[in-house]
Image (cartoon, coloured by chain):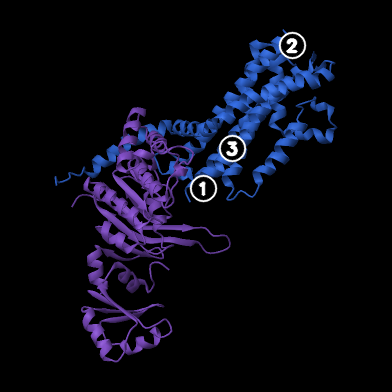
Amino acid sequence: MKPITQPTLAELTAEAMEWGRKPRRRGSWYVTEHMVRAMRAYGWTIVVGALGQPILYLLGLAVGLAALIAVPIPDGGREVPYLLFVAPALLATAAISVASEEFTYPVMAGFKWRQYFYGFNASALSSGQIANGVVLGAAARMLVTVVAYWAFICIFFEWLYPGAANFATSWISIVIGLVAGLAFGAPLMAYAGALEEDKGQFALVQRFVFMPMFLFSGTFYPLATLPLWLQWIGWISPLWHASELGRVVTYGKTVEPWLLAVHVTYLLVLTVGGVILARRVFTRRLAK
Amino acid sequence: MPEAVITAESLRKTYKVKGKADFVAVDDLSFEVAPGESFGLLGPNGAGKSTTMKMIGAVSTRTAGSLSILGLDPDQYGPEIRSRLGVVPQQDNLDGELNARENLFIYGRYFGLPAKVCHEKADELLAFAQLEDKAKSRVDALSGGMKRRLTIARGLINDPRILLLDEPTTGLDPQARHVLWDRLFRLKERGTTLVLTTHYMDEAEQLCDRLIVVDKGRIMAEGTPSSLIRQHSSREVLEVRFGSDRNQQVAGTLEGIGDRVEVLPDRILVYTSDGEAALERITALGLSPITSLVRRSSLEDVFLRLTGRSLIE
């Protein structure tokens, strides 16, 4: 057998420094790639959900509820058809709904059921990059959902109320939807990452966080319609803030500048804070 | 002697436990591993082997001491060190939702390898792991042995300088173990440094050039398998069984036969240079064991001698 020539320690050190360069820079994207590839396993539910949900909701509300509520809704200095009022909120809800799936069970699977995060962590990636990749992967799925929603909203309004929606700015609701999903999802991801066992907590989040938020965040009626003692649900809900912003860009609802700043700031604080917290949770757990 | 690729000095790892004193998982470990060496950590469950492996793998930080992997400090250069390591964890953590080939491909991407290289490496490693016909199978559908081979293959995607294997053959049937050993020998021949933990004696003897025996986070002994046996045990061991209720009672009468007598719940071990002669002396005493066996001393005996405990409890 040919004798093996081993490199010197200095050569090995230099080699490691060279190999580490790319993962340090692009590691988060590598994890994103993995998460997106893994989604193909349930790709048809993503596509069917992304296309089917807006069709069902918009059609159902257009031919059903909107026909019943024939009176225009006064909102921020404008009067808009009911369907136009709810559409931006439905778009944000769709993103949040994706977030409630992608930031819970896959996180638990990564740490506990399948433990693939530990596999990622043994490679050149850092735990912070793993957290980033999970966020970006979920954001990719949210993007598909909100783009589909926005496209259907455009089609519906061109068909039913031509000229009612402002398409020059309504595309911004795609960005708003994404941020809404992350504002709800990132703190949820930190929570999911900290859970040692699934004892039905995610089902509770669906029932007692997502559902009340959906019902009491000014989704189907202006928040001011609610008695004051219930309005706080909307104030703390990323859905209300996102819906209001969505209405501004979709049909030009007038909002006080200070309130506009509150909506944007609140969503960004939840997103950034949630991501920072999730990265900490991931780092602590993966180093055990 | 070439410079060590792993150097640990007074390595220590403690964990905080609520309301109690810190739990010491690794206590003052010092060792070096030379390039191309096959180095083993031997010890029972809870000895601190996996914790040590995590520190070498640059995923768990040390509480005290110094550690250098490939000339770098893992606290500062984790990604750089890990980019040249291959890791085979105790528990397979493949992505069950991807197929075998995708698992290899995507893992290669983590090291920044171009997609084309990842494809080539994936095919090469599927052949290495004898899993070509399972390339498109979802990981969840593979047997335990296949998953293990795939995990080892995954650990090699970046042509690592050091391969860390934590209990690589636990839970495998004998045939699968031998296939794995064969693959590891080939890597060794290619100059890959192997660091492995095991509580299987035969595995340690087969695979390790040198090893440390660890118990309760501390090194009990260090050396080659044969030198450890020479130092801490006799050449042969006579195993005799008199029945679980009589072993303890008979053991007293065997004192003086061989160098040392050890009583286990199911058998008595007589450490001696000549097992057959020891058995003759026992029969001459009028004792007739239910079964008797003369064998070479193994690392199991070394461990028993050093810790007073059996490795697999």
The verdict on a common chain for dots 3 and 1 is yes
Element under disc 1: helix
Q: Please tell me whether residue B37 is drawn above or below residue A75 in the rendered image.
A: below
- Residue occupied by mark 1: A285
Q: CA distance from mark 2 to mark 1?
A: 52 Å
- Residue B227 in view: yes
Of pointers 2 and 1, the one earlier in the residue sequence: 2
Q: Please tell me whether residue B139 is drawn above or below residue A53 in the rendered image.
A: below
> In this structure image, what is the colour of chain A?
blue
- Residue occupied by mark 3: A103
> Which residue is more in the foreground, A252 or A192?
A192
Q: On the picture, is A88 further left or further right than B240? A: right
Q: CA distance from mark 3 to mark 2?
A: 36 Å
Which of the chains bears the disc numbered 2? A
Element under disc 2: helix
Q: On the picture, is B312 further left or further right than B97? A: left
Amino acid type assigned to the residue bearing label 3 in the image: Phe
Amino acid type assigned to the residue bearing label 1 in the image: Arg
Chain that is coloured purple in the picture:
B
Residue at 67 percent across and 30 percent down: it is: A266
Element under disc 3: loop
Of pointers 3 and 2, the one earlier in the residue sequence: 3
Q: Which mark is residue A160?
A: 2
Residue A155 at x, y percent in the picture: 67, 13
Q: Please tell me whether residue B281 is drawn above or below residue A270 in the rendered image.
A: below
> Which residue is more in the foreground, A41 or A210?
A41
Q: CA distance from mark 3 to mark 1?
A: 16 Å
Amino acid type assigned to the residue bearing label 2 in the image: Leu
Residue A147 at x, y percent in the picture: 60, 20
